[in-house]
Amino acid sequence: MASSSPPRRSDDSDDEDYDRLMSATTPVSSPTRTRKRNTDHLDSDHLDSDDAPLPSLNLALQRVNGNHLESITSFATRKRLRPDQITAVEMHAGDPLPVQLSKIYILGLANENALAKFQAAKPTFEINSALKTNMTRAVNATLCSSNISQYRGETGKNDIQALLLRFRWGNFVPGTEHDQAAMDIVQKFIADAFTQSRSIIKKEIVKSVEIPRPKKSNSDKKHVPSLRPKEERTTIYQLTKTVVQKLSGGKSISIPITAALCARVAMMRKWHVKTDGAVNADSDYWKLIDDDLRDIRTKARRDTTDPKIIAKRVAKAFSHMLEKDRMRHGSNPDEEIPDAATTTDVAAITYQADIDVALGARNQGQHLSPPAEREEEQSQSGEQSGSGASTGALEVGTSAA
């Protein structure tokens, strides 16, 4: 008659020595099942000999014979322990049971201490190249978005951080957001990226209208900026194209140039050149732009809450600023400004469109939260899934980086 036990698999070979070790252990017979007697009224002197603990159990566990030691040593060798470790195991096997258990507990505490030291000594979080590329690209796309609500302050930085939590670019793995030291590094990088990109935009605006500064001389006379003649100033389309190229690192244009973007650049140039033709040297340049942007949106919301009417009013205000810029700067006020993106990079067009959608949703009070968090919030409120930045387009940038 064939045996009913299943055949041993080849991948069980590592446990053969363990099986030999267990089979070599002195078996302890189990007592037969008997009716439980009520002995609560009896003390230990009245208990039958059958109820006394079995001293042979402890003896069997503590006694190590040659078969035990051979199986233990073979099992340790199979697990590739070092010779000194195997010797320690053999000594441990000969210890009494209380000593063995105490050593195991002590080793557990020692491992906890070693792990604590490892956590304390782990290297500081460093932003890898993929994370830098994606955060910088998101910052530039935000500054070039027609839905941006603030060029300075915490709003833009919070938007980038929310997108980062959602798409996990580079080495920003789950759990990094709970490491305050790592988040400080990430937030500083985002803030620095905004500062650098704003500086690039401002420098190009200055060069588009001002006479170049003379080279440094021994004179202590402070340079007073002056404007170039109107015909020698850069047109708004060429200025916007230069800004985009600089933000792209001088490479191929990765930000679509549209009439809406040209209008935003025109608003920035408006606050550098005063109405009377003088140069605005105010240190609060970007604050003036943010105030103007806030006033435009505030006036657009007057007497209505309809998003379409608000958007139409905002577009009209920017169109008016664009026309004024074309009349004041450059020799060709009739220069054609494309209504659609001029870049042929479909992925770049989609990426910018998704950033615009995400910022537009945030302007309407929606959150740029991670999908899991958003689904949890919606399940609690009973709402259906809301709109947000498209995962696919923003992931194109991630994989490309």
Image: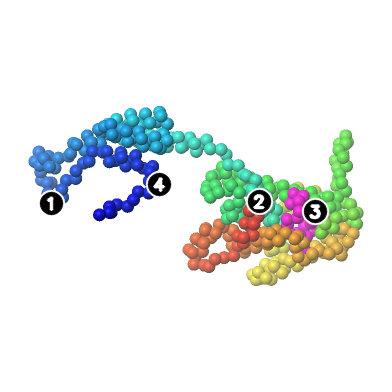
The residue under the point 63% across, 48% down is 131
Q: Name the side, left or right, on which 129 lies relative to 229.
A: left
Image coordinates of residue 222 in percent, x first then y, are 85, 40
Q: Name the residue under label 2.
A: 401
Disc 3 element: helix
Write down the residue under mark 1.
35
Using residue 248 as the reference point, say whether residue 23 is left or right of it. Answer: left
Q: Pointer 2: residues within 10 angstroms few (<14), some, or many (20+)?
A: some
Q: Name the mark on residue 242.
A: 3
Q: Which of marks 3 and 2 is nearer the N terminus?
A: 3
Q: Is mark 4 on a helix, strand or loop?
A: helix
Amino acid type at image mark 1 = Arg
Disc 4 designates what residue?
A: 11
Q: What residue type is labelled 3?
A: Thr
Image position, residue 290 (x, y; %): 71, 56
- Which residues fall within the magenta stretch? 240-266
Say whether disc 4 or disc 2 marks the residue closer to the N-terminus: 4
As measured in the structure, the alpha-carbon distance from the residue carrying label 3 to the one carrying label 2 is 23 Å
Name the N-terminal-most of marks 3 and 4: 4
Answer yes or no: is residue 360 visible.
no
Indicate the amino acid at tag 2: Ala
